[in-house]
Amino acid sequence: MNFAVKSCGNGRARTGVLQLGNVVIDTPALLISTRKGLPHFISPDLLPTLPSPDAHLLQFSPLHFIEGISPKTISSIGGLHQMLGLHEYGFSAVVRDSIACIPEHKSTNKAGASFETPSGRRLITPLEYMEMISCMKPSLWASLADEVPAWVSEKRNRTSVDRTLRWLDSCLKISSTGGAVFGTIVGGCSVKERQRCAEEVAMRNVSGYWIGGFGLGESMDDRSTLLNAIMDNLPDEKPRQISGLELPEEVLQGIAAGVDLFDSSYIYHLIQGGFALTFPLDGTKMIMDDDSGSNQIKINLKATIYRKDTSPIVDGCSCYTCQNHTKAYLNHLLNVHEMLVQTLLEIHNTHHYLGFFRRIREAIKEGKFEQFRQKFIQQRRNHLIAAAPANG
């Protein structure tokens, strides 16, 4: 793995280039969320419909493979790239628990991390995790983490850091894979523990950093303070990846702090709700909508207002969905519970969100990132204020 910072904004926002084998990605970048290595609703033959090379970085959880095909079988095939036939794509392995807070079991957590898996809650030891990583051969992988929500005690935050550092050391000792390792940084809402974890991980032989424990109940103000505490203690020459920052304004907050890579399930959740992203990417004023379920960022295509709407989701959008289908057709597919709509929505939403990241990179290169960010947030705030009486 190679990473180089190319340009910086007035603050910490920066652009860079990440090279993973023959995959070259401009950062800040979005990692496409997958289920067992493939986007949730897009088949391999449709992947070329997504912008290239922006969509060539995929994030997966090794725990999704606990059921079905075994890691050893994947290894005998040649790894995840070989099994899926996606040789021109980069894979990032990240494990997150789907439950925000569980009771502590000191005797077991000394041995490994407890995660919710397709087979129920399982204890995953560093040895088991590294066996998965070795078999799947991802381009980069994050070490195990003990993530905690915002409301835990200082003692629990301290314990989470101690465990995560211990698991990182175990993973590094066991590792025989050629993939780049990202050391995990946790610490909950404790500035002191976030600083300590960042300092400790920065001293390890890692290729980059995965920042965990966000999106678990912290406020936007707390998040800025925590991110700054982390970044103050990390070297500039290595990439930083984060989970839990999903909304556009949260992504902008992360980029302002110096984050390079974002993995999230935001697009998946939009699709499940029947939503399509519609906010403008060129900095023009966001259009106010009516009672169709819009919140200025997205529209609810289930709304009856779209039943006879023969326009695309976004005028001028070059994605396959907007070039070939109308809001009325998508509304029909949603109302009859046709699975095709999930594919069409994932194509559009992924295309649109990748365009958002592309526009951010342009703003950083132009030295106008902070203006872009403030304008986006202000327009979003104005819309929410204007919509409040109608929704009240």
Image (cartoon, grey):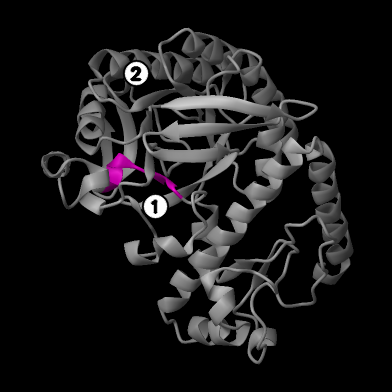
Q: Is residue 59 magenta?
A: yes
Q: Quadrant of the N terminus?
A: top left
Query: What's under tag 2, amino acid-wise?
Result: Trp
Q: Is residue 333 above or below residue 4?
A: below
Q: Position of residue 198 (x, y in %)?
A: 55, 15
What range is drawn magenta here? 56-64
In this picture, residue 182 sits left or right of residue 366: left
Query: Which residue is the extreme one toward the front?
Result: 22
Task: Assess disc 2: are there few (<14), some (14-19) or many (≥20) residues with their C-alpha within 10 Å of its C-alpha.
Answer: many
Whichever of labels 2 and 1 marks the residue nearer the N terminus, that label is 1
Q: Which mark is residue 34?
A: 1
The amino acid on which the numbered mark 1 sits, given as a three-letter code, is: Thr
Relative image position of residue 314 (x, y in whole percent): 68, 72
Which residue appears at 72% of the width and 26% of the height? 12
CA gap between label 2 and label 1 equals 25 Å
Left or right: 60, with 368 as reference point: left
Task: Say what secondary structure mark 1 lies in.
Answer: strand
Report which quarter residue 363 is drawn in: top right
Q: Nearer the viewer, mark 2 or mark 1?
A: 1
x, y percent for residue 316: 69, 72
Circle 1 residues within 10 Å: few <14, some 14–19, many ≥20: many
* Residue 268 magenta-highlighted: no
Residue drawn at (32%, 28%), measured in percent from left and top? Answer: 179
In which quadrant of the rendered view does residue 311 lie? bottom right
